[in-house]
Image (tube, rainbow, N blue to C red):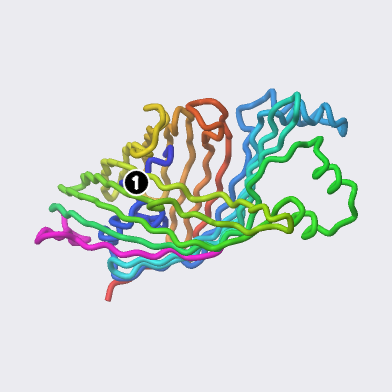
Amino acid sequence: MGDAWTAVNNDEYTLLYNPASLSRHGHDLTITPLNPSLTGTSLVGDSEKQDQMEDLDSDPTAVADVFFDFPIHAGVGFFPGLKLFNFGFNVIASESVDMLLRNKIHPTLDVDYRSDRGFVTGFSLPLGTHRLKPKAVSGQQTSIGVGAKYIKRRGIYDSFALTGTDILDVLDSDASTEEILDRLGMTEDAAWGFDAGFEHVARRGPMQFVVGLAALDIGNTKFNGTKDSTGQTRQLAPNNDQVNLGAALLYRTSLFRSTFAVDVRGLTEEMETMERLRAGVEVGIPGISLLAGINSGYYSYGAAIDLAFMQLNVGWYGVEVGGAYRRTESRRFVIYLSLFDFSFDV
């Protein structure tokens, strides 16, 4: 759905979008114990790049020609958690790597590798006398929420000249994998981050309108890194703060469901207007949905199957990795599986 999720986030990822949405939790207790996700670079729809990959040989020049300005991404993650009334808690466990080879005259490889372990927690509080009960067919509710996260990050965040002595020395050495990673700048640090949010929900029959405002990673969640033997500080990628505004219109009946959502991201940042926009739509029947959206000018689409014991989402999407509107697109796929979720009321 183009990641337009600030006002929709009624799933296990609520705490990553808006902690105020915990007030919309429809049960006393919900547990999501096993939910792995896999993401990677996608070549779907890029026949030219597929042909180049098939004809790829071991010649360094040919390899460089194929991968210049072609973002490479891979990631795997787990986000098990629970919601208890208006309180939420999730474990964070993820591995991801992003690489981009640029500048043909002086080839440089940008590397962002992250191995995260930690947790995120939060709670929300409905304001005033208007409370929206889970089974209510009409009503409204305004809520605020706060969240905190602790992340221990191990990784590499640097650019390497492919013809530089550091890379050549590493390639020529017989060092172990850990020694190679250390020489490339592997470091680790831990940091706390904080979130806050606001949400208003209005429901009338099968229609529900939601507007939300979220401030995430307030003041940036920064990792200081460590100093190497030369006294230089090894850097880790931060979680930059962002303020996001979202609105969503949801329609739910026993036979049909639909969602239309819009996000405006980075309200406190300087960027082009179109770079801020996310929009998405979902249509389906109970058990299966089709989804599509646009994310800063790049399209996305996918499908979701939701059975009693299993939820499976498969999708393709694009994200901007070049730092400006439609400069460098990274096309990716996502496979998400959630097993043995259950909810109950006391």
Q: Position of residue 246 (x, y in %)?
A: 30, 41
Q: Is residue 339 visible?
A: no
Query: As displayed, is residue 301 above or below residue 255?
Result: above
Query: As displayed, is residue 52 above or below residue 289?
Result: above
Disc 1: which residue: 6
Q: Position of residue 18 (x, y in %)?
A: 34, 53
- Residue at image x 42%, y 34%? 293
Q: Nearer the viewer, residue 210 or 167?
A: 167
| Residue 120 placement, left or right of 40 | left
Q: Position of residue 127 (x, y in %)?
A: 15, 59
**Span of residues in magenta:** 117-137
Residue furthest left as drawn: 129
Q: Is residue 28 visible?
A: yes
Q: Quadrant of the N terminus?
A: top left
Residue furthest front as drawn: 231
What secondary structure is marked by label 1?
loop
Q: Nearer the viewer, residue 193 or 232?
A: 232
| Residue 265 placement, left or right of 171 | left
- Residue at image x 43%, y 35%? 292
| Residue 212 placement, left or right of 71 | left
Query: As displayed, is residue 323 above or below residue 149?
Result: above
Q: Nearer the viewer, residue 342 or 127?
A: 127
